[in-house]
Image: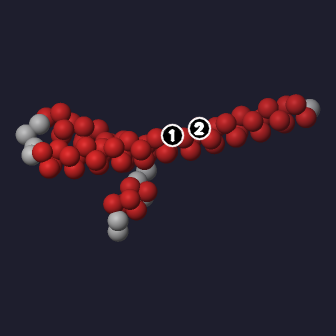
Amino acid sequence: MSDQAALEGLSYEESRDELVDTVRRLEAGGTTLEESLALWERGEALAQRCQEWLDGARKRLDAVLEAREGSVDDE
């Protein structure tokens, strides 16, 4: 399974938790430059995945609110 496919399978909470862990590891230091770069890249990908979840949630909320407003206007 590709790294992108693995990311797509993560829930928001899983992505967020792994991102928090990744940031902690980066802040703790003690890694090589290569390891730090790999962690940073993973963190960027996880942050993007979290943003995708949040954007999707916003769209769903907006759709519900719009539908609700439409039904109130129809009354």
Q: At label 2, which amino acid type do we have?
A: Arg
Q: Residue at x 46, y 41 (%)?
A: 51
Tag of residue 58:
2
Residue nearest the observer in this picture, 52 or 13: 52
**In the image: residue 48, left or right of residue 37:** right
Residue that badge 1 annotates = 54
How many residues crowd around disc 1 within 10 Å: few (fewer than 14), some, or many (20 or more)? few
Residue 13 seen in the figure: no
**In the image: residue 27, left or right of residue 14:** left
How many residues crowd around disc 2 within 10 Å: few (fewer than 14), some, or many (20 or more)? few
Q: Give the x, y percent position of residue 45.
A: 36, 48
Q: Give the x, y percent position of residue 26.
A: 18, 38
Instruction: Please identify the residue farthest to the bottom as the structure is shown.
Output: 1
Residue 56 seen in the figure: yes
Q: At label 1, which amino acid type do we have?
A: Leu
- Under circle 1, the secondary element is helix
Q: Quadrant of the N terminus?
A: bottom left
Q: Quadrant of the C terminus?
A: top right
Relative to residue 19, is residue 1 depicted above or below?
below
**In the image: residue 5, left or right of residue 68:** left
